[in-house]
Amino acid sequence: MGKPHVLVIPYPAQSHVIALMNLSQKLANQAIKITFVNSEFNHKRVIDAFGKNVAENGLLRLVSVPDGLEDGEDRNQIGKLTERLGQVMPGHLKQLIHKINASDEDEISCVLTDLSLGYVVHVAVGLGIPTAAFWPASVFQLVILLSIPKLIDDGWIDENGTPLVKDKMFQLSPTTPAIHPTKFVWFNIDTSPSTQKVMFHASWANSKAVETADWVVCNSSLELEPEGFNLAPKVRPIGPLPASDRLGNLSGNFWPEDPTCLQWLDQQSPASVIYVAFGSFTVFDEIQFQEMALGLELTNRPFLWVVREDITKGKHHAYPQGFIERVGDRGRMVSWAPQGAVLEHSSIACFLSHCGWNSTIEGVSNGVPFLCWPYFGDQFLNESYICDIWKIGLKFESDERGVIGKEEIKSKVEQLVGDDDIRTRAVELKRRVTKSVGEDGSSDQMLKDFVEWLKS
């Protein structure tokens, strides 16, 4: 019998790849061999961003399979990507597993898949391979997916996921987030009804793999979501998986990080900088982008702003006239940041965030208060956790144009930075979460049990 050898397959989106890469690093540190399967498109991006050959990084090896889309097709069309993956992924994975088992002395002993690719569990079961599923978002988001039959029975949604209730919020209990039915994850990923329907049925089908998989682990903790884990007893908390605990530098990023912003942070006063980052999907129109810039300028505080090359509609970021000159060295714009290191930095005062789950738990793990600007997917649910349940952040209000204006940005920054109670709660939540991933904490113990199972 050779080494335990785990085939790891993330859904091909930035946050999913980073979360499963973090877990893979931890498993490799425990002498478990990992073959990490990206789509061909993302594999190239990860290699390019890393800047050197990482194909053979000790126990962690990167391989790729096609995603079913042609060169030049838009991978941000999530409905189309999800459909194509479902058509091509099972066959490619079977071929890959047979190829590895024929050529590698260590045969695949477990398939660890992103639960957003639930059908991979059925592929592995068909081949007689033990299975584990990883949920990269909040456990309560998974609870909602597992509750779909009840949501239909209770009249919240129809059998295609379309919300039927428009005048009240959905909340399972006072200790779980409240969310408007139009913000259910499948319904607010895209405005196209056909995409909403595709994502609803894919999400529902994937969630059923919870029953089939031998293990289901989640990048969350009992301290963050006690009620969520009560409602999904098979799902085990092993997070938050820290962004800083990595082999070498292989993070799974699709863009090269700009580390020079860390030297810039070194020159700022403690708890003075607004960190602004919106993940890999958020896109702004020109009006909103300009209001954001002017709002940051109005705060009169130093800010570090991650401005992806594709963050605005159109090719060029139209900063307001004279903005760059006026903010001078007080504002630092980068195309992608080493976010784990940024949020750990003592100069950070708050995190203006899209509230993706990775960003949420990285902020929480560093005791940083939030200004919440959700865009789509599960981000509205995470905003409710941050502002309503944990009470460590503030929400923005849109104006009559549907735009978050510059004065609103300035006002909320001042309100947040001046609120000692929010900062105290953020620091206390950090303490509890840090304890859960520390030696013999609840998440640490669950991860050790998972590693033991993988080795057995």
Image: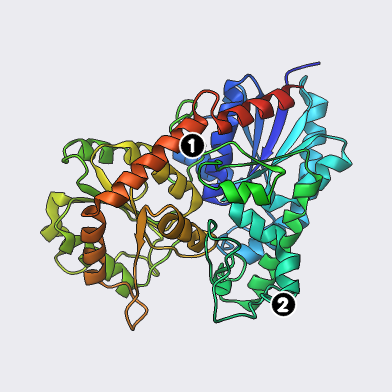
Residue 140 has which mark?
A: none
Q: Which residue was labeled with disc 1?
A: 251
Residue 55 coordinates in the image, percent (x, y): 58, 29
Distance from the alpha carbon under mark 1 to that under mark 2: 40 Å
Q: Which image quarter is the N terminus in?
A: top right
Q: Amino acid at mark 1?
A: Ser
Q: Which image quarter is the C terminus in?
A: top right
Q: Residue furthest bottom?
A: 400
Frontmost residue, 288 versus 37: 288
Frontmost residue, 55 versus 323: 323
Q: How many marks?
A: 2
Frontmost residue, 439 versus 278: 439
Mark 2 burial class by Cα count in 10 Å: few <14, some 14-19, many 20+:
some
Q: Amino acid at mark 2?
A: Asp
For label 1, the SS is: loop
Quadrant assignment, res 98: top right
Say if residue 429 shows up in the picture. Answer: yes
Q: Which residue was labeled with disc 2?
A: 158
Residue 46 coordinates in the image, percent (x, y): 51, 41
Q: Residue at x 44, y 49 (%)?
A: 360
Q: Residue at x 46, y 56 (%)?
A: 389
Which circle's residue, 1 or 2, is located before the other in the chain?
A: 2
379 displayed left or right of 351: right
Frontmost residue, 440 versus 335: 440
21 displayed left or right of 275: right
Quadrant assignment, res 409: bottom left
Q: Residue at x 79, y 33 (%)?
A: 99
